[in-house]
Image: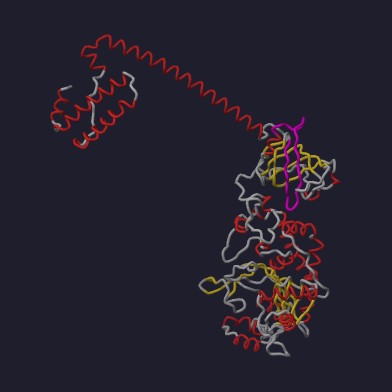
Amino acid sequence: MSEAAAAEELKLPPEALEIKTKVASIADQIKTAKSEKKPKEEWDPLLKEMLALKAQYKEITGVDFDPPKKASSKKKAESGGGEAQQEASDKNKEKNAKKAAVKAAKEAKKLANRLERERREKEKAEKLAGKGADNFGDAPLIKSHEHTDKVWTHISALDQSWDGKEVLIRGHVQTSRLVGKGAFSLVRSSLYSVQCVCFESKEVSHAMVQYAAGLPPESVVDVKGMVTVPDTPIKSATQCHVEVHVTSVHCVSKASAALPFQMEDACRPDAKDGESEEGDEALVRVGQDIRLDNRWIDLRTPANQSIFRIESWLGKLFRDYLHEAGFVELHSPKLIGGSSEGGADVFTLDYFGKPACLAMSPQLHKQMAAACSGFEKVFVTGPVFRAEDSNTRRHLCEFTGLDLEMTIVEHYDEVLVLFDELFRYIFDGINKHCKDELERVREQHPFEDLKYLTPTLRLTYAEGCQLLREAGVEQDDYEDLSTENEKKLGDIVKEKYDTDFFFMDQYPLSVRPFYTMPSPTNPKLSNSYDFFVRGQEILSGAQRIHDPELLVERAKAWDIDLEDLKGYIDSFRNGALPHGGGGIGLERVVMLFLDLKNIRKASWFPRDPKRISP
């Protein structure tokens, strides 16, 4: 022990010195037991005792127990180790150098092996990705940098007449699987799909088959191949009588994100009565919320592709008929002061420091245009906004309105005749032009074809109420129809008249807007009407008041601020033509024509009290 160490030890309390002595003794006993190779069970209690003593030492001194340090080799050499110690040190250096050299050689070999393995894996991956191959692989990003002589054929055109012909198609990979030495893919474009098969051959490598089978679902691909007619129809494809034997496949856009749901689950038919819409483990169905959260994917299903093509046709047929009938399309403002019809369910906003709202109807402006501006016949197609906190299956906060207004000569029946012909023109047109689309919808959302008469069944409001009372339903002639009673009336009419489509007129004046013309025969009634499909309203309309003084009178009866209506009422003070019209909800007509269970299925990107995205 050095003099400094001895001096330090003299400063320790007696208890600490005693502990050091005990620890040294126990350490010798443990060392002896280990050298005699005694089992740990025999000397383990000594070890625990020594550790306890060390902990006690720290409590007394405030520092860890520090055993005496061995003299360094340098000091040993100085104190008499001499040449023998130096010789041992040189031998250790030489031994350590050899070990380091061996270790370095091993590390170099490991690195070389790893680099070689990575090279082979990269080469394999590139081969599987089609690098160096002409007939498969990832296509360059399309940046509109060239024109080629390639000709693409739409999947919808493929039928038996293409047997033996080569085609180039583009679409989404709905499913892809490896079976033996072949890959089977279902490629879909809009609402049409075809099976593509890829088998190993002289022209088709093993890597190409692996590439085709491994494409992520919903990736966009260009597929070239020969059309053949299979022995049995391909039930999973719309083009069930043909398949494409692939000679080349290139990925145009690879799906990089995981799908929130599988397309085959999203295409599954609606749950039957008693089944959960969300499905179960045995039969997965995709719920409405997850569909709408990922609407851009949900819209790819054949049923949705068809619904919105039918909806597009409905809008086209509406315009076509009215253009032929001499109507002019009006683009009415959606930003207005006050509210469209004096109602409270409006979205308000600040318009450069002035109060304003989103139009809940083009009503006032289409009246101005038709009756007061000389256009006589106008129609409007555009968004309509309703701030109704309603979360039913038939309400939206934003929908597409199909409105029209026309002058009449002597009776509002002139408007009813036009609406009757317009709706039958639309229904006939959809049945004629959308046969494929109707079947694609029916596969997922089964429905019965809409039944309608020529001419359309017409009832008075009182007659409709009487039919309800005869069926045991309480309904007063001067009270508004509830949603439940509307549906019951639809069922009664279907059973009695075998039609899903009808209209009623002469509604109570108290349940119609302030600008509705009162009935000339009964002051409690009005020259108003509603059209129904499958027991639900699709159109509400009326003859409008064109006399400014009567308008003021009716507005006061509704406690509407005349200042908000000044421009509207003043437009009738310079001579106004008698007129009438109505408003149609596009999404609701589509929903009811196809008998869908929720209006959100007929809205591209629905807006309701709980949803404002995507």
> Vertically, is 43 above or below 601?
above
Name the foreground residue: 510 vs 127.
510
Quadrant the C terminus occupies: bottom right
Percent coordinates x, y for residue 530 in the rendering: 72, 77
| Span highlighted in magenta in the image | 182-207
Instruction: Please identify the residue farthest to the top as the structure is shown.
Output: 83
Residue 193 visible to the viewer: yes
Q: Is residue 338 magenta?
A: no
Residue at 28% in and 31% down: 48
Q: Could you tell me residue 581's position as x and y percent?
A: 72, 77
Snapshot quadrant of residue 121: top right
Q: Residue furthest front?
A: 42
Residue 577 visible, this angle = no
Quick one: quadrant of the N terminus?
A: top left
**Residue 54 drawn above or below residue 81:** below
| Residue 330 vs residue 96, the one in the foreground | 96
**Residue 182 vertical placement versus 589 (above, below):** above
Number of on-image labels:
0
Of 278 and 251, nearer the camera is: 278
Residue at image coords 73%, 90%: 521
Q: Main secondary structure of the magenta part?
A: strand
Residue 342: x and y in percent read 60, 79
Does residue 198 belong to the magenta stretch? Answer: yes
The image quarter containing residue 294 is: bottom right
Instruction: Name the quadrant containing residue 459.
Output: bottom right
| Colour scheme | secondary structure
Provide residue 467's location: percent of width, then percent of height. Answer: 74, 80
